[in-house]
Amino acid sequence: MQIVHDLKNQLNGLKLYATFLRRRIEKGERPSDEQETIVKLIGGLDRAADDLSIIVKYGQPVELKKQPGFEVDKVLSTICSNLDSQIVWKGKSDGVQGDFDHFKLTDALKWVSLGALKHRKTDDGEGEITVTAENDSGQAVVEWSGLRELNHDPFRSFAGSDEVKLALAAKIIEAHGGSAKFIDRKFVVVLPL
């Protein structure tokens, strides 16, 4: 844990120097490609710091603050409408609600939705992802359809930032007594209601 914090501090120091360089370049007559390089450097440092934060969260136990009345279907509808026109909510509001930690489960469902976008069926990153949720015998069953075939379980992988977030999402879902799996080119999340 301390190593991650030390690395994060080093990245923040690099970001600070990069920010100072960007300001100096912006004031002078420097080529635009230098400014673009600095912007990319700062963006990369931000992503690395975010990834380290996710790894720290993954390493900690999930402490839930459950509240009644969390409406899975409405939260998913909002997530889909805020993300991308290629992820479409196809569910119906049919009382898919339970006692869940609002903040943690919302983050988990958002990360699964973002992960679904990264694993779309087509190689060019196009194609529609459909999201549905239903109450199936006292369980919320949520599916993200339209994914390509994968040779690994992205909920159990740490192959990049997106899959670390999927692993953390699975950990949060499992802390709620549910499961997150990749089955038949779909992400499937099951939560007890």
Image: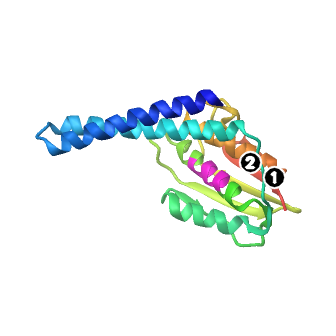
Q: Position of residue 117 (x, y in %)?
A: 54, 48
Distance between mark 2 and mark 1 Cα atoms: 7 Å
Q: Is residue 164 above or below residue 3?
A: below
Q: Main secondary structure of the magenta part?
A: helix
Label total for image: 2
What's under tag 2, amino acid-wise? Ile
Q: Residue at x 58, y 45 (%)?
A: 115
In this image, 136 relative to 142: left or right?
A: right
Q: Are marks 2 and 1 in contact (CB under 8 Å)?
A: yes
In this image, 147 relative to 124: left or right?
A: right
Task: For residue 109, say whether it is visible.
Answer: yes
**Quarter-of-image position of residue 150:** top right
- Which disc is residue 172 wearing? 2
Q: Is residue 186 above or below residue 83?
A: above
86 or 68, which lies in front? 68
Q: Secondary structure at mark 1?
A: loop
Circle 1 residue? 176
Q: Residue at x 58, y 33 (%)?
A: 5
180 or 25, which lies in front? 25
Q: Position of residue 1 (x, y in %)?
A: 66, 31
Magenta range: 107-114
Q: Secondary structure at mark 2?
A: helix
Q: Position of residue 62 (x, y in %)?
A: 76, 46
